[in-house]
Image (spheres, rainbow, N blue to C red):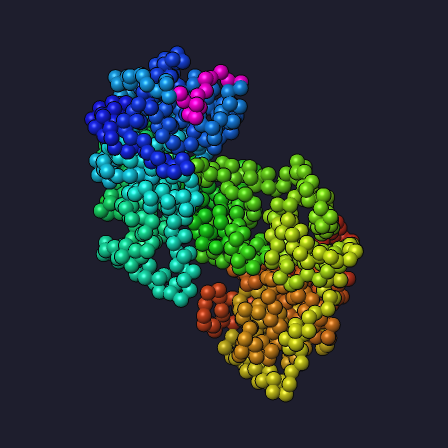
Amino acid sequence: MPENIPAQFLASAVQNSDEVAFRYFDQSWKTVTYSEFLSLSKGISAQIRQLGVVQGERIAIISENRPEWCAAYMAILFCRCIAVPVDTQLGATEIRNILSDSGAKLVFHSSKTSAAVLKAVEDYHADCISFDSLKVSILAAGEPALGADPDEIASIIYTSGTTGSPKGVMLTHRNFCSDASALVQLGLVVRNDNVLSILPMHHTYPFMCTFLVPVFLGGCITFSPGLKTGELLSAIRDGGVTVVVGVPRLFERIRNGIIAKMKEKKIISRLLIGLLRGCRAFRRGLDVNPGKIIFRAVHKNFRKVKFFACGGARLDPDVMNDLEALGFTVLEGYGLTETSPVITFNPAEKRKPGSAGKALPGAEIRIVDEEIVVRGPMVMAGYYRNEKATTEAIREGWFYTGDIGNLDRDGYLFITGRKKEVIVLSTGKNIYPEDVEKAYLEIPLIKEIGITGVERNGIVESIQAIIVPDLEYAETRKISNITETLKWELNEVASRLPEYMRVHGFSLYAGLLPRTSLGKLRRFMLRDILTAWAASDKEGKAADSSLMKDEIGRKVVSCIKLVMRDDTPVGGKDNLELDIGFDSLKRIEFISSLEEAFSISLPETFITEVRSVEDVVARLKEYAEGRGPQKGGIITWKDIIEKELPAGDLQHAGLIHGPVETALIHALIAAMKIFFKLYFRMSAGGLQNVPAQGPYIIASNHSSYLDGFTVAAAIPFAAFRDLYFLGFSKFFTGGIKQLFARISHVIPIDAEVYLNRALQMSSYVLRQGKSLCIFPEGGRSFDKDVLPFKKGVGIIAIEKSIPVIPVYIDGSRRALPRGAFFVRPAKIKVTFGKPFTIDDIDIEGELPIIDKYQFFADKLRERVIGLSKVS
């Protein structure tokens, strides 16, 4: 087999002249035969020569995938010139930099990329040829130069780079031809195959697998009309595609879409998921593939597909296992631009989930200090005009990939991370960001996550996350406070991870994380995102003129500025939480301000129905149409918590008990006190600090579901008689649960959706002379550390002038830890501190105080923690 690309292409084109080389969509499906492909390539090469371009010159191609892209590439090599494929997602400045660095004299482009290309060459002299203006008369002459030396440079490919340092990779004819030959030897793709082309050809992975290999074999290449699911399925189904080449994100999408449709079939969804698990076990354990028969409906769009080929990044083994359980075959490989690109591939007869496969024929792999190093004819000639980088990367014939991995005893390669991306903590611990990200991606509310190190004086002390939340999931689940929900979900995952792998803080990001066109995260940009996001870039933000032209829009903006206490410009597309900065309490202030400004009563669900400013405006137009004059003004927290509750809420408050319920309460408390005394050897200190009469608030740390029962069992019965607890309604709704809530003095509240109602109910209970037990952390802590207190307790305590009793519970976490179903006989001790009010705190010595409610909550937390040292 000749070791230059034009000779191999010409041999294939002559042998398969009448066969279809390309299928593409242009209002309808159209084809290009090998004979037509060859003629087009010769014609373009003639045009190149007419422009006076000589051998060895660099010629750029900046276009989406289309037959002309491939023809232009072949034409460049026919002239013994060097092709410079360029990423179509780059802007004019980046394109100019690549043209300048490569010294390109000519640029091929399409109408879609013409604007960026023409702007890029304004200050750079280069001829430009649009694929849409190629003249048929020109495409008639020109003979290819087939004598290229195998070690001549065929392409200079600029790595898009996940590290921020793109370099020009010089790849020779021998590099490409040897890699293509090794793939052909595997026998995975044959002459009559039809390969789907969806990944941009400026990357070596799709260039090799969806262009060179099928063309050398005489196969067909189908260009997908787009990346939407319907477009992809149409291309696969209608075009008779046999091989789908993609990246992990594509196959995750396919897997998730299929499983989501299974779950929609509510009656049989559990059966289908059970069958999927069974098929997964059969496929992995016995190499039997029942999924293709059981899930044959899934395969109607993939009738001729032999396998999915995955590369570009690591594929989650669960995705591979699920797809294989469904009856598909998934072959994962690994490579880099510098290796032309494929180094390893999973053999079809024995695939290992999580592995990148075995070395291709001709490739050698070693592990040196955990780093993967490669030797073989596919390794690049070097970096263009960068001898220093070349010398660092290639040592004694071995290419140091920068990837970290290991080889098992069967020769399968497993990638564990990028050497440059490893985060080394001050403790010496190495953190592989992808491992941490995978763990936290179990949280359905997280759409994307990027992990980066937190430095202090140049030393990385911990890691933090940039999170893109799944807003559709939040809307479906009626999650009104994404930040708070994520805190608890993150802590839940963190409790199962080693301490050094836990994120310490996170930032929400409204956009998508920066990735290469193959889906790799550009980690070097994460810190820039954090910096920009922290600054919020408010100075450069302009007000939304269309919003301010609308009367309701102006009032909404005014209410936002009242709540946020600043004059930041507001846009219609701004997300209330991600862009404006609303937390759950600010949402309540905002709703109350809207009700005052528009003289309307908004439904309780309004707070969960709106996500953006324009959502608010649209809903208000529905509610407020035809209303009279509006007021407008600042709403205080006292106004909010003193608002009259609906009659239905008061009925369920459970403040009045009949004789039967009273008897049950006595029996329950007596039994609970005996049980806690005997089983947990419970002791209570500081009971003298509990007033004989209310109202007051008991505020305790919270580390176990036992905590509410612990407080109830610790205090005298006379105190319990007038003490009430707020509980999550999901635990106390319906039948026996509702009865239990009444006799346990639990008032069920959905604090996620109706936080304002929870505050109002608290205020109502205290007005009746009753007392409250509150757990200000908002949920169970994950270790002995007391989490920050939410300021809701401060709002109630200050606005109602109610004394608060700090309480510390020790031992309940050991008795019933997170995830446990049975209680253990651990000793529990409860310590009650002295009650205090805001008047008992020396505020003057603590100035400046921005938020008095949070200030009170923080001081309360300090007192609770102080009790832990004496308990």
Judged from this view, the residue extending furthest toward the top is: 52
Q: Is residue 357 magenta?
A: no
Residue drawn at point x = 56 percent, y = 59 percent: 478
Residue 642 coordinates in the image, percent (x, y): 74, 66
Front-lying residue, 106 or 390: 106
Q: Is residue 792 left or right of residue 418?
A: right
* Residue in the image at 52% along x and 53% along y: 472
- Which region of the structure is painted magenta? 123-135
* Residue 575 relative to residue 115: left or right: right
> Residue 327, position in %: x, y?
29, 53
Q: Is residue 776 or residue 186 the one in the foreground? A: 186
Can residue 450 be seen at all in this image of the molecule?
yes
Q: Position of residue 848 (x, y in %)?
A: 75, 49
Which of 394/806 is in front? 394
Asked whether 126 falls inside the magenta stretch, the response is: yes
Compared to residue 669, the image places residue 2 above or below, namely above
Query: Can you tell which quarter of the image residue 358 is in?
Result: top left
Q: Residue at x 62, y 85 (%)?
A: 662
Q: Quadrant of the C terminus?
A: bottom right
Quadrant where the N terminus lies?
Answer: top left
In the figure, 661 relative to 846: above or below?
below
| Picture layout, residue 625 above or below residue 194 | below
The structure residue drawn at horizontal position 23% and vertical position 55%, both measured from the top left corner, is: 288
* Residue 292, image x, y percentages: 28, 54
